[in-house]
Image (cartoon, helix red, strand yellow):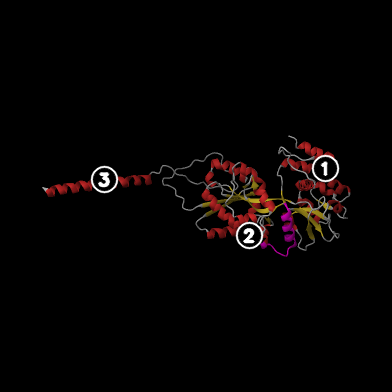
Amino acid sequence: MNKKVLFLLFGLLWLTVSCDLANNIIPSQEAESTPESSAVETAVIPNNPVPETTPDIAIPTAAVTQTQPTLRIWLPPEIALSSEEGAAILNSQLAAYRTNHPDIEIIVEQKSISGQSGILNYLRTGRTVAPTILPDLIAIPIDQLGPALSEELIYPIDGLIETSLLEDLYPAALELVLKDSQLSGYPFVLTGLPHLAYNSETVTETIPTSWEPFINLPNTLVFPANGLPGGTLGLQLYLAAGGTLVNEVEQVTLQFEPLVIALQQLELAENSGFILGQSSNYSSLEESWQQFQAGTADFAITNSEQYLRLRDAEGIFLVTAVPGLQQPLTPLVSGWAWAMSTADPAQRELAAELLASLIASDQLGEWSFASNFLPARKEAFTFWPEDDPYVIFAKEQLTLAGAMPTSNSNIMTALNNAVFDVVTQAKTPQAAAQDALAALQP
């Protein structure tokens, strides 16, 4: 009797354990065979607009797992293809980073900087249509940082950049990227550094540093008086005369007296015959450089990118700062910056690591020299030729340079028109200044 009872109890215990095991296995099998939801990535063809309608997404029969982190970078052709040698160096640097980080997939795409297929426009439309294919790191002109930050298309990079990398920037470079005390991006090159080029065979006298003695030299100056470089020269003279670009209520404006003083300098140069008559026909530095190169003028307004690309191998075309009212004009610069376009903490860490590699002094120095861009970091010049007189000049000018104070097209158009009207003697400095102020009235 006791043996029968024991045998019965053992049988009941075996059935109970079997049922518990079955209950633990079946749910996990069902979970593997019938996933509730999943997502797939769609590829983007570079420079083609993202569709404005949400594409149909097929739900796979098996769950998709991310096996490798992906880092997406968007570059404009101006940076990716800055020069043949520069493109090769950038590709080599990215390839080396891939080799050293085999666990990260790096996708680099080219996008333009403006228009329907521009980087910012893609970011605006893509974040609601196809957020998974948007970039983590982008290179954009510095004057686009403010609008992009206000629209939350990019995010501040405070805390992601080592202090030493910020301290090594030229003052104007750091000023350009600080927006409301936030670091909107990291500037890697500075552009548009204005200066004079002159023919050392025809300019034999010492070049004065102030305007009136300068325009009394027995030489001629050519510059695009009908374009943005002419307006920039007018802006430099205006700021040197004490002008500001906003009034007491922070409205964009110009001041009459400083603008008249600035325009009077151009009137004096025109009346003395110092400004080449054809200057009013040119709207670009390329056009005026041709006249300078042909020997039609002895001086030309140029900038860093143009001079690095076109200077003569014989070293006849030298450089100097643009004379100002009492001392050389403060050069105004803009540039390009790297910016973070992801808010995801993990992706930001990945992007910051790659960014640190690209802005390392040796990497940036090598690429910027090959690409004819002035680096925004002082240490990057270590990798430029030490015996090049232009390198010495550029480093001095960047130390003195100011950040371009405006990208407002209305101000620059008003200044362009005022300079053109005075150089063509269509208006007096007073009349041209009055019209410029009127054009900015709300």
Is disc 1 surrounded by few (<14), some (14 to 19) or many (20+) residues within 10 Å?
Answer: many
Residue extent of the magenta highlight = 382-401
Return the x and y of residue 43 as percentages of the image width and height: 53, 48
Quadrant for residue 385, please give it. bottom right
Task: Measure how far apart labels 3 and 1 are at the Cα level.
Answer: 96 Å
Q: Nearer the viewer, mark 3 or mark 2?
A: 2
Q: Amino acid at mark 1?
A: Val
Disc nearer the start of the sequence (2/1): 1
Q: Verify whether residue 396 appears in magenta.
A: yes
Q: Nearer the viewer, residue 415 or 134?
A: 415
Residue 440: percent from left, percent from top: 75, 37
**Which residue sits furthest top?**
442
Q: In the rendered structure, are the residues bearing label 3 and label 2 in contact, judged by CB atoms less than 8 Å apart?
A: no
- Out of 211 and 312, give the one closest to the viewer: 211
Q: What residue is at 62 percent from the left and 59 percent from the top?
A: 363
Which amino acid does the dot numbered 3 rest on?
A: Cys
Residue 212 can be seen, yes or no:
yes
Whichever of labels 3 and 1 marks the residue nearer the N terminus, that label is 3
Q: Residue furthest bottom?
A: 387
Q: Quote the CA–CA distance across marks 2 and 1.
A: 44 Å
Q: Main secondary structure of the magenta part?
A: helix
The label nearer to you, 3 versus 1, is 1
What residue does disc 3 label?
19
Q: Which residue is mark 2?
A: 361
Q: Please tell me the numbered disc located at residue 199.
A: none
Disc 1 secondary structure class? helix
Q: Is residue 113 visible?
A: no
Dot 3 falls on a residue whose secondary structure is helix
- In percent of the image, x 15 and y 49: which residue is there? 6
Residue type (three-letter) at the residue carrying disc 2: Ser
